[in-house]
Image (spheres, rainbow, N blue to C red):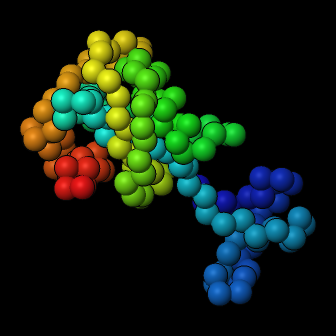
């Protein structure tokens, strides 16, 4: 999010040089710089004891490719809590172990995505309303079901390599 007006008082911002940061939108009334902001989310490679990954289809995301479980952090949550909550909400599985892989910037939506590998026990999925379908896919076949080069593809590739 790029600020043009102050979210506190509504005044139009000016550009002001702030240290090493360069020119930053600044509110003269509140005397506060307002850096561009982005949302933070998680994306998870959900793996079971048989080296299968849970991939989902969400028509509003893609009608042709599977995706990994992902979601936005809520106020008061840390990233691991978000990952565990999203996996439970979207496919109904309980996480036994979670491991941070790395972060990815999703430029299209101005989001920082924190990538995780989550270990679960293989059970039947309980899908949320936002998930159209889910499948257990052998990890060795997962990349071919994801959009080449996407964040999900990158996360799964790195999970396989580790």
In this view, which residue lies farthest toward the bottom?
A: 20
Residue beneath the point at 49% across and 45% down: 41
Percent position (x, y) of residue 85? 51, 29
Give the answer, above or below, for where 126 lies relative to 120. above
Point out the image quarter for the N terminus: bottom right
Question: Looking at the picture, how far across and down is residue 3, in whole percent?
Answer: 66, 60
Q: Name the spot of residue 22 as percent of width and height, x first.
A: 64, 84
Measured from the top left, where is residue 26 in percent x and y?
A: 76, 71
Residue occupying the point 74% across, 58% down: 5
Within the image, what quadrant is residue 31 found in?
bottom right
**Left-right relation of 152 to 74:** left
Quadrant housing residue 120: top left
Q: Can residue 112 be seen in this view?
A: yes
Q: Which of 8 and 100 is in front in this view?
A: 100
* x 67%, y 75%: residue: 24
Image point 29% across, 12% down: which residue?
124
Please indicate whether residue 12 sits to the left or right of residue 112 in the image.
Answer: right
The residue lying toward the viewer, choosing from 29 and 142, is 142
Asked whether residue 43 appears in the rendered view, the answer is no
Question: Horizontal placement of 94 versus 9: left or right?
Answer: left
């Amino acid at each position: 999010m790029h600020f043009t007006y102050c979210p506190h008082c509504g005044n139009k911002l000016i550009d002001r040089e702030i240290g090493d940061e360069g020119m930053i939108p600044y509110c003269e009334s509140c005397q506060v710089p307002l850096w561009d902001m982005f949302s933070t989310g998680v994306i998870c490679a959900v793996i079971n004891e048989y080296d299968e990954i849970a991939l989902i289809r969400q028509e509003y995301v893609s009608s042709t490719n599977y995706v990994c479980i992902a979601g936005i952090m809520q106020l008061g949550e840390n990233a691991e809590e978000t990952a565990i909550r999203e996996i439970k909400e979207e496919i109904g599985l309980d996480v036994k172990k979670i491991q941070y892989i790395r972060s990815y910037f999703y430029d299209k939506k101005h989001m920082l995505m924190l990538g995780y590998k989550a270990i679960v026990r293989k059970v039947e999925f309980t899908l949320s309303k936002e998930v159209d379908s889910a499948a257990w896919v052998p990890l060795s076949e997962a990349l071919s079901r994801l959009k080449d080069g996407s964040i999900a593809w990158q996360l799964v590739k790195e999970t396989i390599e580790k």
